[in-house]
Amino acid sequence: MKTIYKRILLKLSGESLAGEQGFGIDQQRVADYSEQIKEIVDAGVEVAVVIGGGNIFRGLKGAAQGVDRVKGDYMGMLATVINSLALSSGLDAVGQPSQVLTAVGMFPIGEQYSKWRAIEAMQQGKVAIMSCGTGNPFFTTDTGSALRGIEVGADVMLKGTRVDGIYTADPEKDPTATKFDRITYDEIYRRGLKVMDMTATIMCKENNLPIHVFNMDVKGNLRKVVSGEPCGTVVYQDNTGR
Ligand SMILES: Nc1ncnc2c1ncn2[C@@H]1O[C@H](COP(=O)(O)OP(=O)(O)O)[C@@H](O)[C@H]1O
Ligand SMILES: O=c1ccn([C@@H]2O[C@H](COP(=O)(O)OP(=O)(O)O)[C@@H](O)[C@H]2O)c(=O)[nH]1
């Protein structure tokens, strides 16, 4: 298998991990993701993963129900640790080693994250699973992905989600929305598209980290994306640097 990337940052949505059940962790979904990831590691790609926590807890939603925002965000970060351990276990089951790294120290659940530990794990053929997002409240795992992707020098941030790319509006709400094959960071901002939070999009733009949004729930899509086959939406700078 020919690949166009050497090192990738893969963002997985917490909510997607819930599968059809809508909450918690669907083990079949974890197994499917694990197989897809192993396939690209076997092809020689170094893989770092950041997982969301929305299938378990979101700080903002908790705050709307009276939970202190900062405590709620820590609850959300802990949710990402639970998901990371689930993925690590799923990867074990398919014979793919991984290393869970936590932005907030909680050894022995995972090792404390550092750029160098993550790179070392990837160079040893392990998937580096980076949990707790950025480790700070008021951020999201999208921003955590942008940050970690930039830190470890990933060639691209792949956002594996449950829609097959970026649309003119949320395709889960607007059936008339149409898909972009390519779009600039600025166009996302101008149109106020909510596929990813703006902080993450702007970080990627300012640090020249390309984004590729695709449907991770279709088996084989991850392989397609890293092989350069058309799939999903690519976010790029236009030639004036925008
Ligand atoms: N313009 C858009 N194009 C594509 N998806 C969008 C858009 N606006 C909102 N979305 C939503 O963003 C979601 C992808 O974000 P993701 O972080 O994976 O999900 P979540 O935040 O629910 O965990 C999609 O499931 C889709 O409903
Ligand atoms: O850097 C971070 C990343 C995540 N979170 C918390 O963790 C939750 C789960 O992450 P996210 O909503 O990004 O998950 P996803 O939408 O991908 O399921 C968020 O709602 C926040 O409460 C946080 O406080 N800081």
Image (cartoon, grey):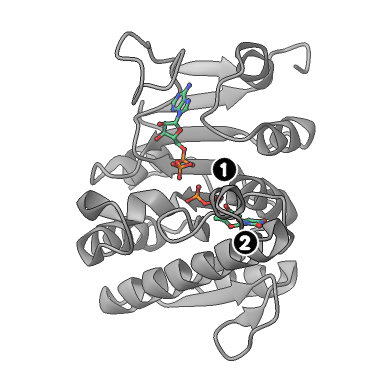
On screen, 109 above or below 69?
A: below
User: Which residue is denoted by mark 2 in the rendering?
Assistant: 72
Kind of residue indicated by mark 2? Gly
On screen, 105 above or below 67?
A: below
Determine the image quadrant of residue 224: top left
The residue carrying pointer 1 sits among few (fewer than 14), some (14 to 19) or many (20 or more) residues within 10 Å by Cα, namely many
Say which residue appears at 42% left-offset and 22% top-offset: 170
Q: Which of the two residues, 40 or 203, is positioned nearer the viewer here? A: 203
Q: Nearer the viewer, mark 1 or mark 2?
A: 2
Q: Is residue 135 left or right of residue 1?
A: right
User: Which residue is denoted by mark 1 in the rendering?
Assistant: 157
The residue carrying pointer 2 sits among few (fewer than 14), some (14 to 19) or many (20 or more) residues within 10 Å by Cα, namely many
Query: SS class of the residue under badge 2?
Result: helix
Q: Which of the two residues, 76 or 228, is positioned nearer the viewer here? A: 76
Label 1 – label 2 distance at C-alpha: 27 Å
The quadrant of the picture occupied by the C terminus is top right
Q: Is residue 145 left or right of residue 46?
A: right
Q: Which of the two residues, 143 or 64, is positioned nearer the viewer here? A: 64
Q: Position of residue 191 (x, y in %)?
A: 60, 12
Q: Position of residue 84 (x, y in %)?
A: 47, 69
Q: Is mark 2 within 8 Å of ligand 2?
A: yes
Q: Position of residue 22 (x, y in %)?
A: 28, 51
On screen, 108 above or below 40?
A: below
Say which residue appears at 63% left-offset and 59% top-offset: 133
On screen, 216 above or below 97?
A: above
Query: SS class of the residue under badge 1?
Result: strand
Q: Is residue 67 left or right of residue 51?
A: right
Kind of residue indicated by mark 1? Met
**Residue 172 visible, this orientation:** yes
Say which residue appears at 61% left-offset and 44% top-offset: 155
